[in-house]
Amino acid sequence: MEIREILARHAFGFKKKYGQNFLSDPNLLRAIVQDAGVDENTVVLEIGAGAGSLTRALAECARRVVAFEIDETLRPVLEETLAGVKNAEVIFGDFSKCDLAALEEKLGEYTVAANLPYYITTPVVMRFVEEAKRCRGITVMVQEEVAARFAAQAGTPEYGAVTAAIARRGKCEIVRKVSRTLFTPRPNVDSAVVRIEFGERFPVRSEEAYRNVVRAAFSSRRKTLENNLVNAFRLSRKQAEEALAEAGVAPNARGETLPPEQFAKLADILTDRNLLR
């Protein structure tokens, strides 16, 4: 299946606003399907069907594929590339505006696999991290530097609020690097495939408290964690100092030095002391 020929036949024009960079290399497509752990029992949700190359590759192995595509002008392209594929459904619309709870009722347990447009990468991943109830995991192609942030370790420059949020929900790893030369059109940066396997890694009393403490910790990277907590939750200096000491956090520590498990401990302490407001 030569994507360039199909796109030309339908006079398709790439739209910069949608971040359209399509994959067509069959070896890479099969590798992504394998990275996602897709088999005959898997229901797959794809965000950004594009020209349908990954959709078709997923459908060859999955029980069912449901793909979102925002660009209506790709309809004739997808009709051709997915011709004869009985277990793939394309929904033309903006995934960010869909009712995720209703979609999950329709899908049951599912896995996300996608070549995500760069401009929606973090919002899409965070939506699943914060809202999804029946998602087993996410395998997505993202910009290489974004992949580094998703999978970063505490104490590194890439580590941030997104990293800690993902770590609470599951294990994240970069499973392969992908050259920019494998995309049509060619982007200005290289990419990577990230795999997030959902499953509780450490307990927290309150998901909301954990998220709020993490966001506060990274609200100003130059400030100490103590100062960020004081400003975010209107704590007294003494309240912040005592909570940090109980959590085993060193005086004058900054948020980027705390591993996710320690954020969870701190959130539990602040929750127990009724200090989050």
Image (cartoon, rainbow, N blue to C red):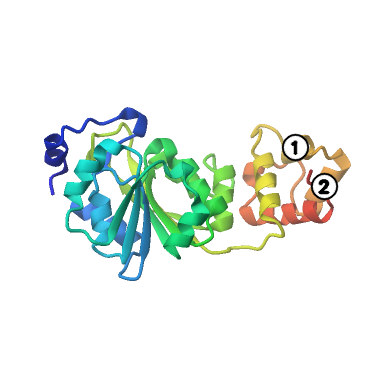
Q: Indicate which disc residue 275 carries.
A: 2
What is the quadrant of residue 77 in the picture?
top left
Task: Choose the circle earlier in sequence order: 1 or 2.
Answer: 1
Rendering coords of residue 32 (x, y %): 30, 55
Q: Determine the residue positioned at 22% across, 46% down.
A: 78
Which one is in front, 125 or 253?
125
Q: Determine the residue positioned at 28% across, 57% down.
A: 88
Distance CA(mark 1)–CA(mark 2) = 11 Å
Q: Is residue 150 above or below residue 37?
A: above
| Label 2 secondary element | loop
Label 1 with label 2: CB-CB less than 8 Å:
no
Residue type, mark 2 in image: Leu
Quarter of the picture containing the C terminus is: top right
Q: Indicate which disc residue 217 carries.
A: none
Q: How many marks?
A: 2
| Label 1 secondary element | helix
Q: Determine the residue positioned at 35% across, 55% down.
A: 66
Rendering coords of residue 63 (x, y %): 31, 67
* In this picture, residue 83 sits left or right of residue 64: left
Instruction: Single out the residue that lies furthest toward the bottom.
Output: 41
Which one is in front, 232 or 95?
95
Q: Indicate which disc residue 232 carries.
A: 1
Q: Is residue 9 above or below residue 250?
A: above
Residue 199 appearing in the image: yes
Q: Is residue 70 above or below residue 206?
A: above
* In this picture, residue 49 sits left or right of residue 262: left
**Alpha-carbon neighbours of circle 1 within 10 Å: few (<14), some, or many (≥20)?**
some
Rendering coords of residue 90 (x, y %): 31, 50
Rendering coords of residue 33 (x, y %): 30, 59
**Alpha-carbon neighbours of circle 2 within 10 Å: few (<14), some, or many (≥20)?**
some
